[in-house]
Image (cartoon, grey):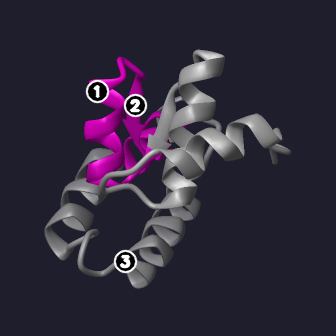
Amino acid sequence: MIDESVEVLSLAAEERGPLSFEDRVCLVLARDNRWACVTNEKPLHRECERENVPSIWGLRLMIELVRAGQLTRETAMETARAIQAANPGYVTDEIMARFAVELM
């Protein structure tokens, strides 16, 4: 959890474009702190690239955590299913199938 400063919130509120306010906050925080942005949002990935902010897909992060022994396959699949249920238009069955294969 991060308690954003008023400055970060003001910067995020000023910026326009395809990102939600929350995504703009994420981008500003990642950019200003030299962090990687973890997201499944395509517009946020594009903006990260434009701003030279490293980004990683959220499902990819779970694959890497499973490979490192820090997350179980079962927990990763449960989490991915929950993400898909909340975002079925973005996390398709095809993406879920590829995710399951990469977890093996």
Task: Name the residue at the left extreme.
Answer: 94
Earlier in the chain: of badge 2 and badge 3, it is 2
| Most common SS among magenta residues | helix
> Which mark's residue is nearer the viewer, 1 or 3?
1
Residue 28 to residue 31: above or below: below
Distance between mark 1 and mark 3 Cα atoms: 23 Å
User: Can residue 104 be seen at all in this image of the molecule?
Assistant: no
Residue depicted at x 26% and y 66%: 96
Q: What is the distance, in whole Å, between disc 2 and disc 1 at their CAs?
A: 8 Å
Query: Within the image, what quadrant is residue 25 found in?
Result: top right
- The residue pinned by badge 2 equals 55
Q: Please indicate whether residue 95 sits to the left or right of residue 25 in the image.
A: left
Q: Position of residue 20 (x, y in %)?
A: 45, 61
Which amino acid does the dot numbered 3 rest on? Asn
Q: Which residues are magenta?
A: 39-65
Where is mark 3, residue-wise? 87
Residue 58 visible in image: yes
Q: Is residue 100 magenta?
A: no
Closer to the chain start, of discs 2 and 1, is 1
Residue that appears at 28% across and 27% down: 49
Q: Quick one: 43 or 10, which is closer to the camera? A: 10
Quadrant housing residue 52: top left
Check disc 1: other Cα within 10 Å, few if <14, some if 14-19, many if 20+: few
Which three-letter amino acid code belongs to the residue tagged 2? Ser
